[in-house]
Image: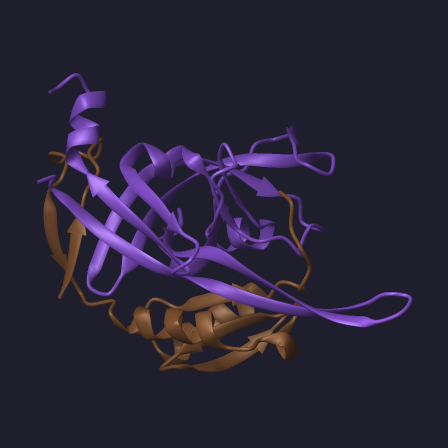
Chain colours: A brown, B purple
Amino acid sequence: MNILILAGDNGYPKGTMIVMKTTSYLDRNYEFFIKADLDEYEGKYIAIHEGKIQASGTSLRELYEFMRQRFPDIIPFITRVQSGQAMVL
Amino acid sequence: MENCYRFEFKYKTVRWLSEGDQEKRIHEVRRPVVMVLLTGANGIKLAEPFLLDSGADNSFIKYDLAELLDLKLSDGTVKVKTAGADIDVYTTRMEIGLVQGNGYCEISKDAFTYVFQKEKQDVPNIIGRTPLFDKFRITFQQYDEKVSLAFMEKIMARKMGGK
């Protein structure tokens, strides 16, 4: 179960709660991403699911299509691994 | 007690090696990264870690992400000031929310967002003050290496003319 809280401006009163399909698996993906040493994937996109990297590559679209085919019922977690440098934005 | 929904995200540690004239050094930084759920104009949903940047006026995404989500970009580019130089970016609108566990909080169905040019790949997706800071009380906890975001109806009610 997933709880959706709406921020208003969408036809529903603000704060409306809607029950959705679970996305708790995203937590595991996020935990993996936070802890993982991703040096070897620098400059590449990675798709994470079930606590591991399922695929990597330079095309976001290809990775998305791969994840949609392999795991059709989930929201894919895909990110590009940045090069390690100090950032001032 | 405020009626809020709380999200808590850990910092992401990034390490890299620099090679100076005399020595090699390992650098380490921790960055606040939040889990964002994006919904494209084509219905595609994607979870992406975004750098939470309190110094950025707005949000920024990479070009190929905008392309995948089929977002309508501005015809031309606009200039945006950064610490390094002015950069040219497109503008767009997108549906964006925060997701964690079984909680999802819609931030905006129509968030104004800048899009980096295609060649600018080595940049993070950034979520800035607008639209996030209008809707959440945000606490950076550097020592604990986490950031918490509390969604508050009261803040929104005040902005909309309520108590």
Look at the picture and state if A20 lies above or below B90: below
In this view of the protein, can residue B110 be seen by the observer?
A: no
In this view of the protein, can residue A1 be seen by the observer?
A: yes
Q: Residue at x 28, y 36 (%)?
A: B135
Give how far across and how far down residue B39 sits, in percent.
36, 51
Q: Residue at x 30, y 57 (%)?
A: B8
Front residue of this view, candidates A28 and A37: A37
Q: Quadrant of the N terminus of chain B?
A: top left
| Direction left: furthest residue | B1
Q: Quadrant of residue B47?
A: bottom left
| Direction right: furthest residue | B21
Q: Quadrant of the C terminus of chain B?
A: top left
Give how far across and how far down residue A66 sits, in percent.
47, 76
Look at the picture and state if B40 lies above or below B19: above
Give how far across and how far down residue B110 sits, in percent.
36, 36
Side of B6 relative to B29 (left or right):
left
Q: Residue at x 57, y 42 (%)?
A: B115
Side of B55 relative to B98 (left or right):
right
Side of B13 relative to A67 (left or right):
right
Number of numbered discs on residues: 0
Q: Quadrant of residue A25?
A: bottom left
Give how far across and how far down residue B117 sits, in percent.
66, 44
Q: Quadrant of residue B151?
A: top left
Side of A40 relative to B144 (left or right):
right
Look at the picture and state if B92 lies above or below B121: above
Front residue of this view, candidates A56 and B135: B135
